[in-house]
Image (tube, rainbow, N blue to C red):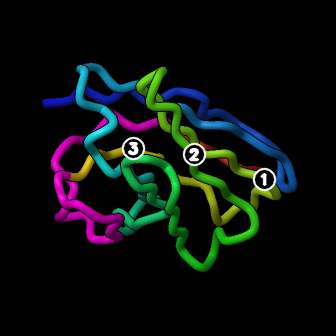
Amino acid sequence: QVQLVESGGGLVQAGGSLRLSCAASGRTFSSYPMGWFRQAPGKEREFVAGISRSGDYTYSEDSVKGRFTISRDNAKNTVYLQMNSLKPEDTAVYYCAASSVLGVVADVGKYDYWGQGTQVTVSS
């Protein structure tokens, strides 16, 4: 089992940047593909980006490609989401999650462990 705690959210102007962190407990962090999701008010939770267990493969949703970068540091049990060129439509609660599926997947149902979320608000 793994416990996840996100941090780094906040209020930023359009065009600005934020770096989200997700710290994991446990000694098996490197055995989990990780993902970042977001949920805006009144909308379903959606996939943002995922990363393989070793970090050598990443996949991002089309609307964030070229702006957001997912990475991980297995020695620190941490996964990151660097968000640049933020837009008001990026406003949401951002969650990190760990999957027991072998590969990187975008399906929210394939993720077993979730953090509590961190709010990101982008003003226009």
Tell me the mark number nearer the camera, choosing from 2 and 3. 2
The magenta stretch spans residue 26: no
Residue furthest to the bottom in view is: 62
Q: Dots 2 and 1: beta carbons under 8 Å?
A: no
Q: Position of residue 124 (x, y in %)?
A: 82, 57
**In the image, which disc is placed on residue 84?**
1
Asked whether 113 falls inside the magenta stretch, the response is yes
| Contact flag, marks 2 and 3 (Cβ < 8 Å) | no
Q: Which residue is tagged 3?
A: 96
Identity of the residue furthest to the left in this view:
1
Specify few, some or many for label 3: CA neighbours under 10 Å numbering under 14, 14-19, or 20 or more.
Answer: many
Q: Quadrant of the N terminus?
A: top left
Please give the range of residues in magenta.
100-118
Q: Amino acid at mark 2?
A: Ser
**Which image quadrant for residue 15?**
bottom right
| Three-letter amino acid code at the position of disc 1 | Asn
Label 1, label 3: how many angstroms apart (C-alpha)?
Answer: 18 Å
